[in-house]
Image (cartoon, rainbow, N blue to C red):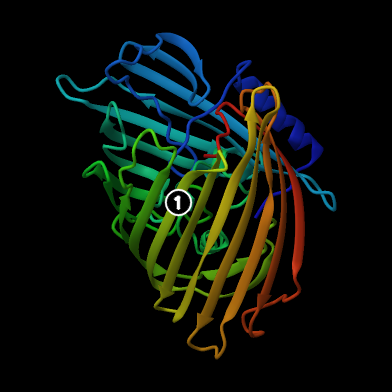
Amino acid sequence: MMAEFTLRGSMLAASLLLAAVPARADPPTGSGGATPATQQPTVGTPAPVQGLSFMPDVGVVLRSGDFSLTTWAFAERLFDPSGPDSWRRFRQGAEIDLPRFGGSNLRPVVFYEFDLVNSDFFRIKPFRRGFENLFVALQDADDPGKFRILIGENTQILSRDDNLSSGNLPTINRSLILEEHGSTNSFGTQFGIQLQKRMSDALTLQVSTQDGRGSLNTDHPRYAIGNSFSAKAILTPKIDPKDARKLSLGLAVDRTGNITNRSFTLGTAIALAPIGGVAATGDRFTVEADAACTFPLAGHPTTVEGEFIRSRFSGSRSDFYGGYTMAQYSVFDTPKAGDLDVFARYDLVSMGSDAITRRATQQALRTGFNYNLPYANKLASLHLEYGRTWVNGPAEIVTSNRPTDEFRIGLRISLQQYVRH
């Protein structure tokens, strides 16, 4: 849930961001919050700039020969017309690309991302609570998507929505089925080993063995590599490069063992205020499927995506399934006027237990827009979002069945361009 902070905390956060950000700046994206694109050029592209430079799609880059350091930062401030304002995210991260091994195309990488909101700007200890990602990797020097193996804390590979950049999200929160799995410390950042290999132009495989019960940024971190086994196949059918279309399909499975003292909590769409829940313990088996397609509609970029997740917990004999579907549409995009994207998102979650006769069903609708401000090079944006949540089910699960309306205005400042399609 979003923490709320005093004016003093807001001023401190703003000062930290300004101190960390050059005149124009912006970060990379990928592993749950960021997987930078500090890649070497392919044939026909200019040689990388040596020394200190700013790349709007990546961040601030310091390069010396085959060594590079990329750093980024971004912040989201939410304004609630009916309540206190709050920081949603305030992150800083970096990727250090060390020189490749002699004669090979592999390089070691050190990666971290830190969120000051997790620790209420260092007022909540321990320090480790702030880490969203922290790992070392060995990867293809030109394209990490071809091959990467890492050890440390990184996002669970299972969910597409979980692995979208936190600095580039279209909505304040991710899908409800995903956010609510977070109440059991499932998904999000986990400690372990991950391997990614592109098998062909159209197929990428990912496997991981992690703990699966939460690590550095949880109250009770777990580091038992092997407690969770996951595998995912990502299919990206080949499309003519001249066609402004992109298609991605994903299918994944996961088994995580020995989950104790956890409850699966239903939350509202924006504030994630609890409205119900049921025990979720034992061994968890999860399946996931996702799809995303970007295409032109009336000459404007349009993206339609969706994801489905189902989990069964053996100890509590409870199960949960749900997903979302969302559409985004670019209304206009010009340097002088900025660019405006509208979105609509529908979420569905169903939860039940063998000990309870009826299931609970939660639905939510979110809609609004994202507006990159004029002359800001997509580094500053305004966000408006309305969410309505309603839930029905037995009293053993649902604690509040009144429909909830929520509204927020958000301001995002980043060292990485906010790109929607």
Q: Is residue 202 left or right of residue 178?
A: left
Image x and y of residue 94, in percent? 46, 28
Q: How many marks?
A: 1
Residue at point 42%, 35% (across, down): 35
Secondary structure under tag 1 reads strand
Residue type at tag 1: Ala
Q: Could one spot residue 338 in this view of the protein? A: yes
Residue at point 76%, 58% (across, down): 406
Q: Is residue 79 left or right of residue 367?
A: right
Q: Is residue 267 left or right of residue 103?
A: right
- Residue at the extreme front of the image, as rendered: 298
Q: How would you rate the neighbour count of disc 1 (Cα within 10 Å): few for under 14, some for 14-19, many for 20 or more? A: some
Q: Quadrant of the N terminus?
A: bottom right
Q: Quadrant of residue 108?
A: top left
Per the image, the residue denoted by label 1 is: 292
Image x and y of residue 244, in percent? 44, 37
- Residue at the extreme right of the image, as rendered: 82
- Residue at the extreme top of the image, as rendered: 51
Q: Could one spot residue 215 in this view of the protein? A: no
Image x and y of residue 242, in percent? 38, 33
Residue at point 58%, 21% (across, down): 25
Image x and y of residue 19, in percent? 64, 20
Q: Quadrant of residue 226?
A: bottom left
- Residue at the extreme bottom of the image, as rendered: 357
Residue at point 20%, 22% (across, down): 101
Q: Quadrant of residue 346?
A: bottom right
